[in-house]
Amino acid sequence: MARLNATELAQRLGQQAEAVCRHYLSNGRKQGNYWQVGDVQNNPGRSMFVRLTGPESGKGAAGKWADAQSGEYGDLLDVIRESLGLIDFADIAEEARRFLSLPNSEPEPQVHRSRTPPAPAGSSEAARRLWRMTHPLIGSIAETYLRGRGITDLRGTANLRFHPNCYWRPEGDGLTQAWPAMIAAVTDLNGRITGAHRTWLARDGSGKAPVDPPRKAMGDLLRHAVRFGDTQDVLAAGEGIETILSLRQAVPMMPMVSALSAGHLTAILFPPHLRRLYIVRDNDPAGDGARDCLVDRAIEAGIEAITLSPMLGDFNDDLTTRGLDALAAQIRVQIAPEDVSRFMVLTP
């Protein structure tokens, strides 16, 4: 008999999904049609779910799993690899073939080998793992969502990507859900990913997913930001991603950062050659406080600080309510004259 390929091995393992879980994920337990365990390395917990029933392939196939904490997902070949710390596919396939030759009722004892430890929940490493599982923004539901918010110019948005099934977990007890999500990479001044921000979306991209809260961040966020464009001597900094992307519709060439919250905005690191900082203010008390703190820090560092203020609650409100032409006219009179020709698209 010819040796089975990876897809066929995964399908054969899926046919015996519960036996596979009892053998390689022995620290978990059966919950209805799922096997629940801490993670794919077989640590105790409840974050990872393995389907025990379903079709041989495709959506909802038996043996498919997902980890709500890390965002990881895969099949039972991945379970064998991670739980035993295997690296080469030849070893993984050999272990799978060995298991499939055993009676389901009498699996051999698990062999414990060295393995890479799991990333702590909510850590920078977990954020980087999530980022590695994402897909391009363009052509995705996340692009549909942004276009619905009036954000159509997506140049310089490499730090935004899309995850088709990102797990949302409630703060307390409750069911873990999977929704499409826009994923933003939070980076330091050197471009290293320190965190990730998730915006869960409706399945058609028409708005946010019906979960509360629809946004969460993970990793090391303080002093870092979601960055759009390469900062040289001028930078605009604000709170929300959509606020900053809305401003970029009017000033597309200006480097900008989203600090994700008013508190984090006050603590952002200044690039070494920065000489002018535009503070993108949200029209609320928290926005006023962040502006005042950031102005003081900029002055102490010898950096010129200019506040950009919306007409409504924030610049996305201005964009969607008043339109791009009105937003551009509003910004043109707030930024320095030399930056109008440098960063704005001027129409005859």
Image: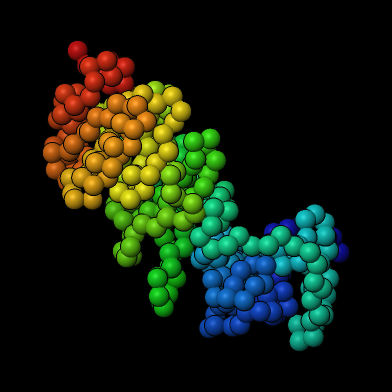
Residue 312 against residue 345 in the figure, above or below: below
Looking at the image, which is closer to me, 237 or 251? Answer: 237
From the viewer's perspective, is 242 left or right of 24? left
The quarter holding residue 171 reads: bottom left
Q: Nearer the viewer, residue 68 or 239?
A: 239
The quadrant where residue 156 appears = top left
Q: Is residue 147 visible?
A: no
Give the camera-side residue of 328 and 270: 270
Between 303 and 343, which is closer to the camera in this rendering? Answer: 303
**Residue 146, above or below 69:** above
Q: Residue furthest right?
A: 1
Examine the rendered structure and indicate whether residue 161 appears above or below residue 56.
above
Residue at position x 32%, y 65% in the image: 212
Q: Residue furthest top?
A: 348
* Residue in view at x 31 percent, y 17 percent: 342
Q: Residue at x 83, y 60 (%)?
A: 91
Q: Which quadrant of the figure contains the N terminus?
A: bottom right
Is residue 280 in sight in this rendering? yes
Residue 92 is left or right of residue 330, and the answer is right
